[in-house]
Image (tube, grey):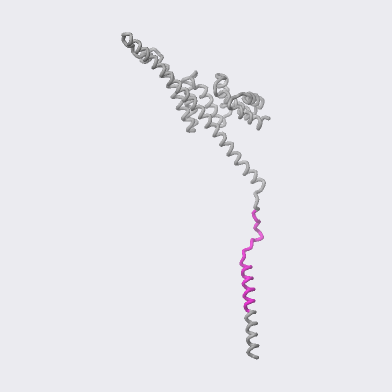
Amino acid sequence: MKKGLTFAAGLSAAAFILSSISVQAQVDVVESTPRMPSSVTPVPATPTPQAAVAGAQNPQAEMFFRLQQLQVEVQELRGLVEEQAYELKRLKQQRLDDYVDLDRRISALSKGGVAPAPTQPESTSNGAAKTGSAAGGELQAYRAAFQSLKKKDYEGAKAQFSAYLTDFPQGRYAPNCQYWLAEIYLLEGDLEQARQWFTRLLDATPEHDKAADAKFKLGTVYHKLGDAAKAKALLTEVAGSSANAARLAKDYLARNLP
């Protein structure tokens, strides 16, 4: 009987000890959990309205900048296409002249005569070949300036386009040079110089291929200069045309001059 009571008392003591250990372990675990100091303010999960506005503005600015870059690249490609078209036309004309000269010489030989000398060396001394040489120099000058523009060497491009206009004031690429000078000044933020060069192009060659683009850009320049009346008149004229810039003009009017 005594042994049974002793055994029961031992079991009760063991149960009490185990219960104490469990309670202590729970207390330790709870107390080991870190607590946030009362002086620290929790960071909100959602951004503030000011941060949201700033975040929304940056992508728009980046998109607008990239759009401007794409427009410049498209204009550069247009200029390159024009340059290649002119070079192709010149080569076709040269081949035609060579064919005519060859036909003339063969005709002279078939009649028993002496074949005349080629006309190209003779024309060199008389001025025809000089004209061809001048055209070649004109093309090289424009190409060099355009390459500087493609490389984003704007100072070099401005100097070369200006030199072209000095050497070839009535040259085939004079309107193109005026247009690209205006574009460069517009990119640099010199609105007055851009206005002058766009106006010069439109006054001298209003029917040129770049006239519509120049008129659209001039309208945007007037808007930035604060002359809404002139800007709207030019942009409305472009928007009503069939030029490639018509859609750009309509969009600009809708966004800025409704």
| Residue 206 image point, x, y percent | 57, 20
Left or right: 73 with respect to 24? left
Q: Front-most of 1 and 166?
A: 1
Residue 183 image point, x, y percent: 54, 28
Q: Nearer the viewer, residue 98 or 225?
A: 98
* Position in image of residue 240 (x %, y %): 64, 24
Of all residues shown, which one is farthest toward the bottom?
1
Identify the residue at image location x=55%, y=27%: 182
Q: Is residue 57 above or below residue 212?
A: below
Q: Position of residue 229 (x, y in %)?
A: 66, 25
Q: How many marks?
A: 0
- Residue located farthest toward the right when viewing the structure as drawn: 258
Residue range corresponding to the magenta coloring: 17-43
Q: Is residue 51 magenta?
A: no
Quarter where residue 53 is shown: top right
**Who is closer to the viewer here, 247 or 47?**
247
Q: Is residue 54 above or below residue 126?
A: below
Residue 20 painted magenta: yes
